[in-house]
Amino acid sequence: MTIMEHNFTATILAVLNENFREKGATILESSELLRYINIKTKAANRGSKSRASFGNLYAIYVLIEDYINHGFDTSGNYDDYEGSRYTDLSKRQNELPFGNKLQNHALNHRVNQEFKKYFHESQYPPYY
């Protein structure tokens, strides 16, 4: 499998290598979600007008933040979780830097639909 490489891919790999003992390329290749993030950050080093699609990254961020805040990254009790409240996720998304102008579209199924465009056979969309 070939990973799309662009200017920001090096930043993603650097963070992964720093946190996972130089296994960044392997982790990026094996994670559909990280590959999706890589695709969505293609315009990260360009001007603000080319970053219109970052709303999906905000949605993924608040979902992962919620997952970590509830300790599911260490406890393994995710099956017991009733789910996050949409209004809490939307509010948190708007609190993030430059998030005050975001609309709710990314949290309303748009991320999953776009994710399927790239990974149409995936069993693991960002949220369901």
Image (tube, grey):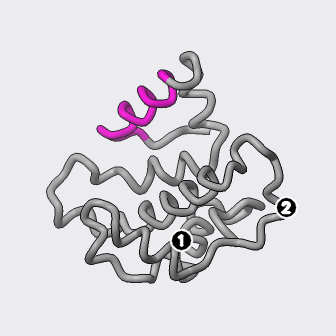
Q: Nearer the viewer, mark 2 or mark 1?
A: 2
Q: At numbered mark 2, what does the secondary structure look like: helix, strand or loop?
A: helix
Residue type at mark 1 is Val
> Whole-percent x and y of residue 83?
71, 72
Q: Is disc 2 in contact with disc 1, using a CB cutoff of under 8 Å?
A: no
- Looking at this rendering, what residue extends furthest in the front direction? 70
Looking at the rendering, the stretch of residues picked out in magenta corresponds to: 5-18
User: Residue placed at 62% from the left, 68% from the top?
Assistant: 116
Residue 111 located within the stretch drawn in magenta: no
Residue 111: which disc?
1
Does 25 sit above or below residue 48?
above
Does 127 sit above or below residue 101?
above
Between discs 2 and 1, the one toward the N terminus: 2
- Estimate how packed mark 1 is, as few (under 14), some (14 to 19) or many (20 or more) residues with alpha carbons within 10 Å: many
* Residue 18 shown left or right of residue 54 in the figure: right
User: Residue placed at 19% from the left, 51% from the top?
Assistant: 46
Viewer-proximal residue, 123 or 16?
Answer: 16
* Residue 28 shown left or right of residue 51 in the figure: right
Q: Main secondary structure of the magenta part?
A: helix
Residue type at mark 2 is Asp
Identify residue for label 2.
Answer: 79
> Whole-percent x and y of residue 89?
51, 72
